Image (spheres, rainbow, N blue to C red):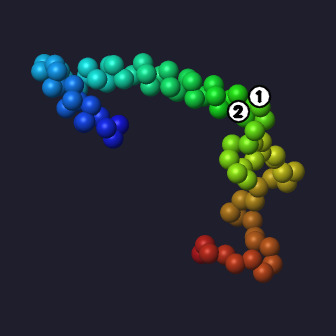
Amino acid sequence: MSYFGLIVSFVTLYKKDLRIGTPIATIIPHSIYLFIGWTALFFLWVFVAGLPVGPGAATYFTMSAEPPRTHTETAPEGAVSYCS
């Protein structure tokens, strides 16, 4: 959307009765196609090819056996607490 004002100004050079809704209505199908396309490529990249999303990034998260600590539990001995 950073170039939207520039697009509107260039289009109004050729069509004087243009309002803001016309470019938006024109861009929406392209946005939907791009979203579907990049989502499909992401799923192919990660789940079909098994490639990592980025350097050092895990593709799958493993759940730990112990439940997460709540804020009411005490911290381990020697741990620094920044909450009061």
| Residue type, label 2 | Trp
Vertical order, 50 against 81 (above or below): above
Where residue 48 appears, as percent x and y from the top left, is 77, 28
| Residue type, label 1 | Val
Quadrant of the snapshot with the C terminus: bottom right
Q: Image quadrant of residue 12?
A: top left
Where residue 46 appears, as percent x and y from the top left, is 72, 34
> Looking at the image, which residue is at 76% across and 55% down?
68
> Looking at the image, which residue is at 29% across and 34% down?
4
Query: Which residue occupies the foreground of this view, 8 or 61?
Result: 8
For label 1, count other residues whose C-alpha is less than 10 Å away and answer few (under 14), some (14-19) or many (20+).
few
> Looking at the image, which residue is at 52% across and 27% down?
35
Kindly identify which numbered label has been placed on residue 48: 1
Q: Image quadrant of residue 70?
A: bottom right
Where residue 79 appears, as percent x and y from the top left, is 75, 77
For label 2, count other residues whose C-alpha is less than 10 Å away and answer few (under 14), some (14-19) or many (20+).
some
Query: Which residue occupies the foreground of this view, 83 or 18?
Result: 18
The span from disc 1 to disc 2 (Cα, nearest Å) is: 6 Å
Query: Which residue occupies the foreground of this view, 50 or 84?
Result: 50
Answer whether labels 1 and 2 touch (C-beta < 8 Å).
Answer: yes
Q: Going by the image, does 32 lie left or right of 43?
A: left
Q: Image quadrant of residue 51?
A: top right
Q: Provide the residue designation for mark 2.
A: 45
Q: Secondary structure at mark 1?
A: helix
> Looking at the image, which residue is at 70% across and 78% down?
80
Q: Going by the image, does 35 lie left or right of 57?
A: left
Q: Secondary structure at mark 2?
A: helix
